[in-house]
Amino acid sequence: MRQPRPTPLLALLVCLAAAAAPGTAGETPRCPPGTRIGAIRIERVNVFDTAIPEENTPLFRLVNALHRPMLTRASTIRSLLTIHEGEPCRSDRLEEAERTLRAQRFVQDAWVRVERRDQEVVDVLVRVQDAWSTRLRLSFSSQGGANRSTFRILENNLLGTGSRLSWERQSDEDRVERTFSYENPALGSSHWRLVLEDSDNSDGYARLVQLERPFWRLDERRSFAMLAFENRREEKVYDCPGGGAGPCPRVVEVDRWAADRRGGLVGFGWSPRGLVGDRLWRLFGGLRHEQVRWTPVGNGGLALRPDLAPRDARQTFLTLEARWERIDFRRVSFFNTARRIEDLDVGDRFNAGAWIANSLWSDDEALTLFVRGRRTVAFGPRSFLFLGAGWSGRWLRGDSYARVGELELGYLVKPAPLQALFGRLVVSIGDELEGPFRFVIGGGKGARAYASRSFAGSRRLVLNLEHRFFAPWYILRLVRVGLVGFVEAAGAWDAGDPVSWNTLHAGVGVGLRFQIIRSADGTTIHLNAAWPVGPDAGEGNEGVRFSVLTATTF
């Protein structure tokens, strides 16, 4: 096949990236030894900082004026802080406070600094720059031949309180959803979080109420959560035509089920010692009730593929979980976003748990076990290897099913200040998977050169290599442009199927990225073009496949 030629835009971006000055991830906040926090001063900055001459223009001042009713209140910022007046000043606490603020969707950037010292007392400056939080979004995306349209009215920082209010209509190949949602991250300037959702869909509905007090800082000792939900939606089952007999170049929909779910939970968390150095233990427990009923859709209420039928269940679980973490965040720039600072989590974690349903308090005897872990190896300040693994399994009335083991490897490196190289390998092995929960591949990362939902099975392998180039300039100080090139391969198959190199479906491609750095969630527009390569490139997969979508990262 004809190989794509390097474009002038690619050459220009590579040259500019190589010539650009190294980016900075900013200073790390430091506390003088033996001091405590006296006063905390809040400084609020609008979407554009007019103290910077380039941002002191009539257009940017107009944007600031329009955003002023939604400018984050000082009380909202204080309610999100992980530091308090009168407590010992610790550098790690200042860093955590900065990370917590930057993680808020309505915050563009945040700084926490010691600004004055009087003997053993220091004053701390908290400077927060708002992101543009009001959005009227009309978007259309196409990925792997699957179209999705979205119309959304959204306010991410309602009257400066940090509350999120939205109404959305979303249409894709499965359903049309109309969803109203409200979220308050700090009720009454407390650390309680409230979430309300109501959705009216073409194939059902969904409702959710959640109230929780999370571990709002690393050294917090207790958490609490309550949740209630109910929903109805249709789930499709994909497999090879003819039940998997013979070659299977592409899967098709073989059955469809309607799922009625309802339930709730009450849970608590406890950290026996809090944060000790950079280590953390947390224990969780609670009660979770779930009721799931599956009904075949069409065909006179009969299942077309009974061998892939999901199971009804009505259970009340005692939930138990233990988590261990080694905390390590690195301040980096131009890895996944174009923001000034990214807080890259390179810590280690391990968790294991069980959901137990007994006939003494539940209709069915059931058990769910799971274990997950992640290890990060740093090769200097700009190169990281991520190793992850997990396993889960279910038992119902003594029968084992839905067993899934997964291994994930990731590699992230910066070969130049405005470049990032990312690699990811995922291998998943499932046994006795119910039809709606089989692995389906196509259209997304790993198989962007193929149609949506082209391949399905109880096993999968996804490999993705991506090189990202960030332009050293902004468009109107609003948009950061980037270019990516990617090579990927993916495959899905069932136990007993012959596995060879032909099981993997490979592709290559290029893409443009446009990140709106002033928006509330760092919206990034992805434009991709991908070509299939390998043995199946000519089996109805010829030509370029284009995709358009929005995300929060490059």
Image (cartoon, rainbow, N blue to C red):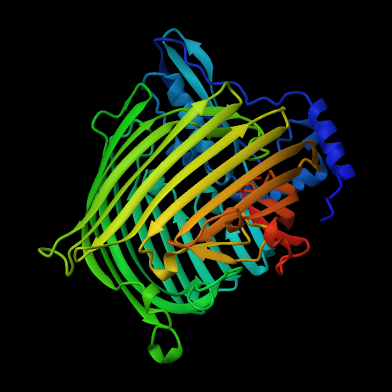
* Residue 356 placement (x, y as % from top left): 20, 56
* Residue 328 placement (x, y as % from top left): 46, 27
| Foreground residue among 66 and 506 | 506
Left or right position of 387 against 371: right
* Residue 223 placement (x, y as % from top left): 29, 43
What residue do we see at 27% from left, 47% from top? Answer: 353
Q: Given the current orientation, which residue lies at the most extreme left position?
A: 360
Q: Given the current orientation, which residue lies at the most extreme top position?
A: 119
What residue do we see at 29% from left, 29% from top? Answer: 274
* Residue 380 placement (x, y as % from top left): 57, 21
Q: As displayed, is residue 371 above or below residue 436?
A: above
Q: Given the current orientation, which residue lies at the most extreme right position?
A: 8
Q: In which quarter of the image is the N terminus?
A: bottom right
Q: As displayed, is residue 429 above or below residue 253?
A: above
Left or right position of 501 against 2: left
| Foreground residue among 234 and 283 | 234
What residue do we see at 73% from left, 56% from top? Answer: 530
Q: Quadrant of the C terminus?
A: top right
Q: As displayed, is residue 524 above or below residue 344?
A: below
| Foreground residue among 468 and 247 | 247
What residue do we see at 49% from left, 52% from top? Answer: 163
